[in-house]
Image: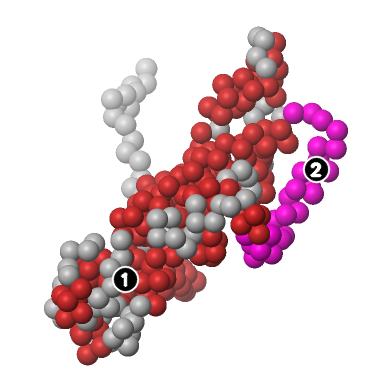
Amino acid sequence: MTTDTHNPTTRTQPAEIKHSGRKHGPGFYVAWAVFILILLVTVFPFYWMLRTSFTSNGALFAEPGALWPSEPTLDGYRRVFGLTTPEESIAQGGAGASINFWLYLRNSFIVAFFVTIGQVLFSAMAAYAFSRLTWRRRNLVFTIFLSALMVPGIFTAIPNFVLIKDLGLLNTFPGLILPTFFMTPFAIFFLRQFFLGIPKEIDEAALIDGAGPFRVFFRVIVPMSSAPLTTLAVLTFITSWNEYFWPLLVGQADDVRVLTVALGIFRSQTPQGSPDWSALMAATLVAALPIMVLFGVLGKRIVNSIGFTGIK
């Protein structure tokens, strides 16, 4: 009789695996160096704007290349928000001119808000018609409409200006809003690509239950498209917020002047021979903060939605 000397409770220990550190080639470090360089080039203008806003005008001319303000001050922000008298502004090296910052900020928000609401709504309805409804020459009409992407915006500025003038809408909010209120080719193309990816069986099921096209759109398609609609809303808001040329043509009156135009006028006021760079950079930074915060919060969602829509 043979005796099994093998102990069933004894388990063979696995051989110890040694992980050697992975060595990266030169391309890895070159790629990181290029990435860091691009990042610095991108971020540096924002840092320089921040540095200039905290520097007095006298220090700017004394040390124009300094990377850090020698004596940080909030005088530029005080002049922007109207917390100084003209005499104090001139003494601080400012232009002595006032800028109704909160009024212009309100005007920019009104224009950007209504342009965003109108463009998202009507572009979504047009994209729904081009992607979900069946009608003759649909693709041909869409191709012709999409060809408008090749027309530079400057070509339509004069006809739009003449139309707004003939309607008596110069220096009014409707005159600022209407040319971009309804839809744009890019917005329709962007949403159409997403709508095409929604199974048509969902529409058919809703139609069998007695829903009409408008009910299918508002009760089915829109809730399923919250991500691209949010992305389009953010992109439209940013574009409208940064618009300069059209508000400059139509909105010259002070009560409808937007912030971008007001900053351009503020820069041109140089009674002391040079612009009030400190206050100008302070105003520009405050004007950019809402967009930076908005994109910082929703930036990842925007990029993902654009990438997802592009592969449809």
Tag shown at residue 141: 2
> Disc 2 residue type?
Val
Secondary element at image label 2? helix
Query: Quick one: label 2, few (<14), some, or many (20+) residues within 10 Å?
Result: few
How many circles with numbers are drawn on the protein?
Answer: 2
Q: Are marks 1 and 2 in contact (CB under 8 Å)?
A: no
Query: Is 187 covered by the magenta stretch?
Result: no
In the picture, the quarter occupied by the C terminus is: top right
Of residues 96 and 132, the one drawn nearer to the viewer in this rendering: 96
At x 54% / y 56%, what residue is drawn? Answer: 170
Asked if residue 29 shows in the view, the reply is: no
Is residue 17 placed above or below 70 in the rendered structure? above
Q: First in sequence, mark 1 or 2: give its number.
A: 2
**Residue 109 x/y as whole percent:** 40, 49
Tag shown at residue 281: 1
Of residues 104 and 145, the one drawn nearer to the viewer in this rendering: 104
**Outermost residue to the bottom:** 62
Is residue 26 placed above or below 235 in the rendered structure? below
Q: Left or right: where does residue 88 sit relative to residue 123?
A: left
Query: Is 136 covered by the magenta stretch?
Result: yes
Question: What's the CA distance linking mark 1 and mark 2?
Answer: 46 Å
Q: Left or right: where does residue 219 sit relative to residue 60?
A: right
At x 39% / y 65%, what residue is drawn? Answer: 262
**Residue 112 x/y as whole percent:** 46, 49
